Image (spheres, rainbow, N blue to C red):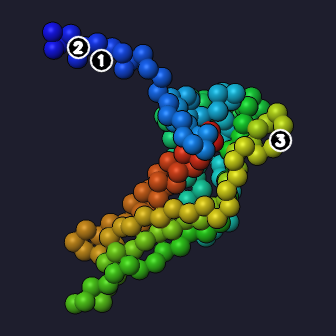
Amino acid sequence: MKRVVVWLAVVAAGFMPISCATEGGSAYTSGALYPSMYKTVAVPIFVNESQDRGMSFQLTEATIKEIESATPYKVAPESRADTVLRATVKQVSLSMLSQSLTTGLTEEMAIKVTLDFEWLDMRTGKPIVARKGFQGSSVFVASLPNNQPIDLGRFAVSQQLARDIVANLQADW
């Protein structure tokens, strides 16, 4: 008898809508995270205004991969896309976080990337999302024994920024 009651409770919970209204009228929903009116996104190579020559290419590639793996959108050429995601890498900076007391050498470094991006509806030409001064950073260990190259920091910050950019493409609730 006890199993039947538990089973009925589980089945009944499965038919309940997944939402929770609040006093202000907002709700949690099980609806789509991304606007469903769009199907394709063009992602031209990001413009680079920084002195780090490879960052725009690496960030563009990471963003394309994140769109393809985490959203319902397909990446398409700009001539056939519903939307276009454009970005400009404004600044890439390195800063020392820690220094060895014995050698005086830098131990940990932070790489910080600042960019502007906008996601445009190609039909209207109006921005769906636009962010200025968007930042991401990563830490890498520059000294021995780890001696991680700066490329590891570039890769990590590109991956993080790509996830953050794609997260900003989600619908406003």
In the image, is residue 121 above or below residue 163?
Answer: above
Residue behind mark 1: 9
**Residue type at the position of mark 1:** Ala
Tag in front: 3 or 2: 2
Which picture quadrant has residue 97?
Answer: bottom left
x then y, percent, for residue 144: 25, 74
| Residue projecting furthest to the right | 124
Q: Are marks 2 and 1 in contact (CB under 8 Å)?
A: yes
Residue behind mark 3: 125
x then y, percent, for residue 67: 55, 38
In the image, is residue 77 above or below residue 88?
Answer: above
Which residue does the image show at 49% across and 34% down from the upper left? 20
Q: Are marks 1 and 3 in contact (CB under 8 Å)?
A: no
x then y, percent, for residue 2: 16, 14
Which residue does the image show at 47% across and 27% down from the upper left? 18
Classify 10 Å Cα crowding around label 3: few (below 14), some (14-19), many (20 and above): few
**Residue type at the position of mark 2:** Val
Which residue does the image show at 55% across and 59% down from the upper left? 55
Which mark is on residue 165?
none
